[in-house]
Image (cartoon, grey):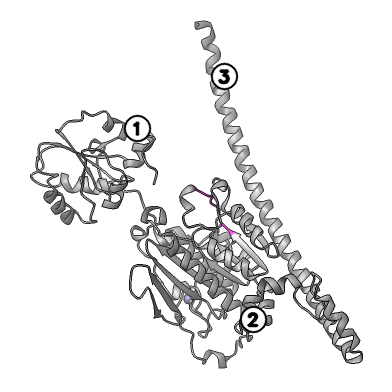
Amino acid sequence: MPSTEPDVEPLDGRLTRLRQQVETAEASLRRLKLQVQETENQVEVKRQTQQAQISNASLSEQTKRASDSLRKSPRDEITLVNTAGCDSPSPRWPLTAAEYQRYGRQMIMPEVGLEGQLRLRKAKVLIVGVGGLGCPAAVYLAGAGVGTLGLMDGDTVELSNLHRQVAHATTRVGMSKVESAFQYLQSLNAEVSYVRHDFHLSPEQAISIFEQYDLVLDCTDHPTSRYLISDACVLTGKSLVSASALKTEGQLIVLNEPPLRPGNLSGGPCYRCIFPKPPSAESVLSCGEGGILGPVVGVMGVLQALEAIKILTKQRHEPAETSASVEAQPVKASLLMFSAYSNPQFRTVRLRSRRADCAACSTHRTISADSLSSGSLDYVAFCGRTAPVNVLPSESRISAREFSQLAQDSSNVLIDVRDKTQYAICALPGSTNVPWTGNADSWLAKAQQSGALDHAQNQKYIVCRFGNDSQLAAKAILERPEQTSDVKDVTNGFQAWREEVDSSWPDY
Ligand SMILES: [Zn+2]
């Protein structure tokens, strides 16, 4: 036995070194793959643009020739009518036979018409975020026949996404969201060109990517990306359809529409005009923490597709960037608010027009294409970082594993501070539920009422979902003058409980 020991050490070291080498190689491979994908996308968009220009030019030439010949001989009309049966646009019919069938129901609407359908086919739309908002938005835009649809997301599909992210599937859990949505959309309408941006948007790339599109949909779920997307839209002159949804409520707003150049007060306001300051970092909940009802976010995503279709199909009059247009009536944005459990469910609030001192879209703007592309704008710092709560000394904390090994008797009191809905999903036997109220005094009053604090000498343990609220509650008890016994919070809450103690604990 001892003779083998000297060999073990070097082998371990070698293994660690090899693993590190593999990790480094894999990381650079991932970076390279991203670069390849992005370049491929750019090449594809360029190719399509050139092709569209060529076919547009030849189409108008053919149409002219066809109408000339029609005037000469009525017999030619019969020949031309017959060609409508083929599956490529003929001189007489700008859409293919299949396109007339596929889009017929929306094309006979006077709001769309043939002109509108042709505008849709020419349009390039970027969807940032292929989740609860982006999936329904992408589905309806692909269905409507938008020519090019860009899909951007850096996440992979998780089981907890599927109740609302309707373009993904159980069989595609673990796959990138962009690839998963692409597979769904391709089977829905293969006529659309899909461009895959398989990564999260960064300030450095935003301008070069947005330039390739006509319209952007913000389907993300964090203020950091909202400001970045709005700034990049202003700088590239693109209209923006922005939506958000949380719990049972949603909001929708169309920004930078019309997308006139910065400084022209007749353009639509940008996100910074409406929200010059970000919400406090602490107040921002994601769907993971705050919960979301599937159809609520679905409604908002569908409304985004609707606004996009309205913008894309309408006749665009080239904006006159003259002094006369500056005097035109400024465009005011309106915010549509949806609340699933209110009556009425929809309300609209008129908001302001462009702000004369906006940091992005005014003549006094401080945000430029250079500052964005160079990465010198720190959106995360602007919106504030949510530091993990850390308010207790280490002696007032206990790990989930240590807690599980304590005696199960009446000398220990476990207070669960999650809300009562989560408590009803799963709870430890013998625990008392006193939901954290966000305020030490009001929570202590509730805890008193529940009897959880009756025996001041008992050791108290506080637990929550992730281990933030439990620290605040433990601190509240510790600071009571009459408190004599110890109070501890279970570090990282039930998340740690599931990882360290009970793997069958529901991962909701
Ligand atoms: Zn603005």
Q: Amino acid at mark 2?
A: Ile
Residue in the picture at 62% in, 45% down:
30
Foreground residue among 282 and 147: 147
Among the 4 quarters of the image, the one containing residue 461: top left
Among the 4 quarters of the image, the one containing residue 234: bottom right
Residue in the picture at 28% in, 48% down:
424
Q: Is residue 440 above or below residue 349?
A: above
**Which residue has dot 2 on it?**
108
Q: Amino acid at mark 3?
A: Leu
User: Is label 1's Cβ within 8 Å of ligand 1?
Assistant: no
User: Is label 3's Cβ within 8 Å of ligand 1?
Assistant: no
Residue in the picture at 51% in, 76% down:
361
Q: Is residue 210 visible?
A: yes
**Which residue has dot 1 on it?**
501
Horizontal and vertical percent position of residue 483: 11, 42
Quick one: label 3 or label 2, which is nearer the N terminus? 3
Camera-near label (2 vs 1) is 2
Q: How many marks?
A: 3
Task: Please indicate whether residue 251 sits to the left or right of residue 197 in the image.
Answer: left
Q: What segment is highlighted magenta in the picture? A: 152-158
Residue in the picture at 29% in, 52% down:
421
Does the magenta-highlighted stretch encompass residue 22? no
Q: Secondary structure at mark 3?
A: helix
- CA gap, disc 1 and disc 3: 32 Å
Q: Is residue 234 visible?
A: no
Q: Secondary structure at mark 1?
A: loop
Q: Secondary structure at mark 2?
A: loop
**Which residue has dot 3 on it?**
11
Task: Please indicate whether residue 409 sits to the left or right of residue 426 in the image.
Answer: left
Q: Amino acid at mark 1?
A: Val
Camera-near label (3 vs 2) is 2
Does the magenta stretch mainly form a helix, a strand or a loop? Answer: loop
